[in-house]
Amino acid sequence: MPRGALLVALALSLAGCQSAVDQINAQAFQPSDNPVTVDTVSRNDRMAELARAQHPRILATYGGEYSDPKLERMVAKVVGSLTLETDNPTQTYRITILNSPNVNAFALPGGYLYVTRGLLALANDSAELAAVIAHEMGHVTANHGQARQRKEAEEGLATRVVSDVLADSPSAKLALVRGKLRLAQFSRNQELEADTIGIRTSGRAGYDPFAASRFLQSMSAYTDFRSVSGATDPSLDFLASHPNAPQRIELALRHARSFGAPGVGARDRDSFLAGIDGLLFGDTPEEGYVRGNTFLHPKLGISFSVPPGFAIDNSATAVTATGPGETAVRFDGVELNPRTPLTTYVRSGWVAGLDPASVRAVTINGNEAAVASARAEGWQFDIAVIRAGDQVYRLLTAAPAASTGLDQIARAVSGSFRMLSAREKAALKPLRIKVVTVKPGQTVASLSAGMVGVDKKLDLFRVINALGPGATVSVGDKVKIITDQ
């Protein structure tokens, strides 16, 4: 079972129990009554109504709306400039900044545009933001939402016909494969068409048309960094729905050259950096923070650590960590009657393959707890359930059945669980993007070393500032750093 499938299995093994993390996150998922909106001369009400029904779901998936008037004004200014040059000047556009660290942007029919704060943290000037938003506007202009729905409906009908009439025929299977390939090719064509429309729109609006290729290159660097750090949800990222390849970058460059040589158009870097200065980076207080190999939740008042070599992923449903040898850890919380013994809870049926003889009561850092072991489908599991205050937390560690290191890893993880002191909770602050001006004597190495709360500081500094491996900084340059100040 691959690592991703293992995490799904861990999630399913704990299904049906209400997570404390979920409860806290739910408070943040409030649809916005007053998002940043840029209206043109008329409205496409029918398509907007379809998108309006999906709006609350998108807010829930991506952490709600991110509110920052300074940032909103900057983004609205870019959208306003683009609407003057769009191929469909009668289209209304409503832009919402999503409170998610994932790097993404997308559009819904009817002119609903979305950009995450994670994407804003990765971009480096207004022209790059304009390229992304104009690309999404291109999907709206070309009615790709309607076209995709129609194409999927056609392919779905064809699939049912082939399955029902020619179920066992080799030609039926070939038809299904060809249908999927046609749909995939159609989607790639949509992206390339949106690239063309977006670069044309942003270039006409006076922005640097080469910004699209620059941002695609930043996305490539971000993907490489993510594959090493591992702490993200790739399904919610830009590249999950926007294919990226060297050929696409070359096509973007070709479209940009139609406006002239590099240097044409405005980047408007200072205005953009002023807008994102102070932008929240990474997790919110409602989700808890990942600091190196430690997870800390100031509102729940708890903390635990994973061994070196593990990468923690803090998602809306649970905290998971993956490590060497396909070992994985899942952490969440559950409500439980305070009179129910933890050993009774462990035996209540939510753990598949439980060894009843392994269940025993223990104390972990002064907290009542119970531990047990289980085996199922080629995997071995260690379960630790800990009562802290009015809440019960669960740590499930899994490894392949042949692994010999599960017990040591599980005891290290569960043994690290503790309650945070009032001082520790007060000291925990979210990370933010801070824009600084390079001073004499400062280098890429010294600036990155001063960042806090993140791993692989040098690599991350280069990624968020679009600096290649050999690139340097000069006195007077403005750069982004990550800090809790």
Image (cartoon, helix red, strand yellow):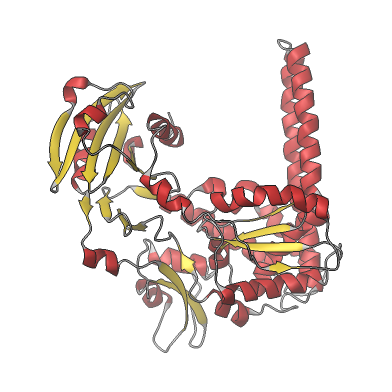
| In this rendering, position of residue 55 left or right of residue 428 | right
Q: Nearer the viewer, residue 183 or 344?
A: 344
Q: Quadrant of residue 35?
A: bottom right
* Residue 59, x across and y down, in percent: 58, 53
Q: Is residue 220 above or below residue 392?
A: below
Q: Nearer the viewer, residue 321 or 114?
A: 114
* Residue 169, x across and y down, in percent: 74, 11
Q: Could one spot residue 123 in this view of the protein?
A: yes
Q: Could one spot residue 254 in this view of the protein?
A: no
Q: Is residue 399 above or below residue 169?
A: below
Tag count: 0
Q: Is residue 240 above or below residue 473?
A: above
Q: Residue at x 44, y 61 (%)?
A: 282
Q: Nearer the viewer, residue 343 or 272?
A: 343
Quadrant for the N terminus, please. top left
| In this rendering, position of residue 162 left or right of residue 434 | right
* Residue 256, x across and y down, in percent: 77, 67
| In this rendering, position of residue 14 left or right of residue 205 | left
* Residue 179, x across and y down, in percent: 76, 29
Q: Is residue 419 above or below residue 276?
A: above
Q: Residue at x 80, y 44 (%)?
A: 146
Quadrant for the C terminus, please. bottom left
